[in-house]
Image: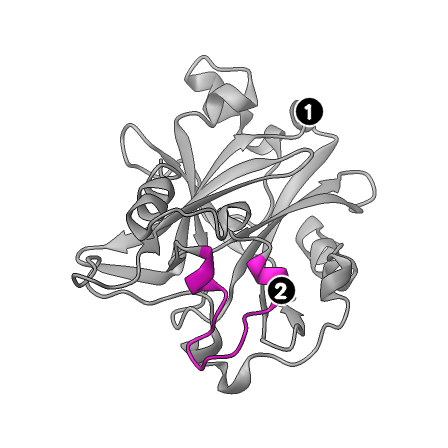
Amino acid sequence: MTATNKILNLSLTLIISASMAACGSRKESGSVENSSRIVSLPPTQPAGSKPLAFCNSGTSAEISAKVKAYQNGNIYDMSLVWLRLTTLPADFSSNSSYIAMWKWLANSSGAAHLDGTALNFMLYDDKTGKPLTSWKQTLMWKDISSIAEAKEITDPNKFFENVSLVVDLKDSAGDYDVLKITKYEHSTNKALSHLDTLLPLFHANPVDYAIETNGAARAEVLQNLHPFKSYTDKGFSNSQFQAMAKDLCF
């Protein structure tokens, strides 16, 4: 059994928080009406519109990352997202662990759905804008260390300071809400830890984000992932939230 197949077999056992325990129905009709992501075409906002976050960041015990909406010409391509890994697991360089990524969504009733197919991604050199790898489903240091060595880099964290990932979400309608980055033990393929981060674009003001387009309250599990959740009702203006969201970009 290949490493990828082992990952797929483990998809139903991924750790999801207790508030998502009632995994169930997908969003009604699979449309963006109930999605936390907003398709913005072109990538500019009309004057007076609610501010959007085009970038996001997240931190867990072992992984930190930033995400950025993927711009293709004068439109945003919701099927792709840029990812920057800013902190890697401490044992990543020992090849005792590897990383794979997934996507999930939640509806207003709190029911969540984890897509059972690991996401494909490709590494890009930020300085040249050229791909460093073909499409992959697992990220392990031994598989990319030769690329780093060619740059005279031996530290994975140093390597990823100038390397980004393009993640293929296969989600052109923007239905899925969250990117899950999961660390696995190499010897057992057991999921050890994960990081969940909201996929852009979404409302930068957490008060705006808390309400779906149909007027229903957004799932609490999604609201709690908003980067500015703790600033709710603290008197911040829309322009301040937009500036804060811009600071999350890379």
Q: Which mark is residue 90?
A: 1
In the rendered image, residue 210 lying in the magenta stretch gets the answer yes
Looking at the picture, which amino acid does disc 1 mark?
A: Ala
Secondary-structure class at tag 1 = loop
In the rendered image, residue 104 lying in the magenta stretch gets the answer no
- Residue under the point 70% across and 60% down: 8
Residue 117 seen: no
Q: Residues within 10 Å of mark 1 (few under 14, many from 20)?
A: few
- Residue under the point 34% across and 51% down: 54
- Residue under the point 37% across and 41% down: 244
**Residue 48, position in %: x, y?**
20, 62
Q: Is the N terminus in the top left, top right, bottom left or bottom right quadrant?
A: bottom right
User: From the viewer's perspective, is residue 7 above or below residue 174?
Assistant: above
Q: Which residue is mark 2?
A: 220
User: From the viewer's perspective, is residue 60 above or below residue 44?
Assistant: above
Please state which of residues 224 and 187 is positioned toward the viewer in this rendering. Answer: 224
Which of the 4 image quadrants contains residue 98? Answer: top right
Q: Which mark is residue 130?
A: none
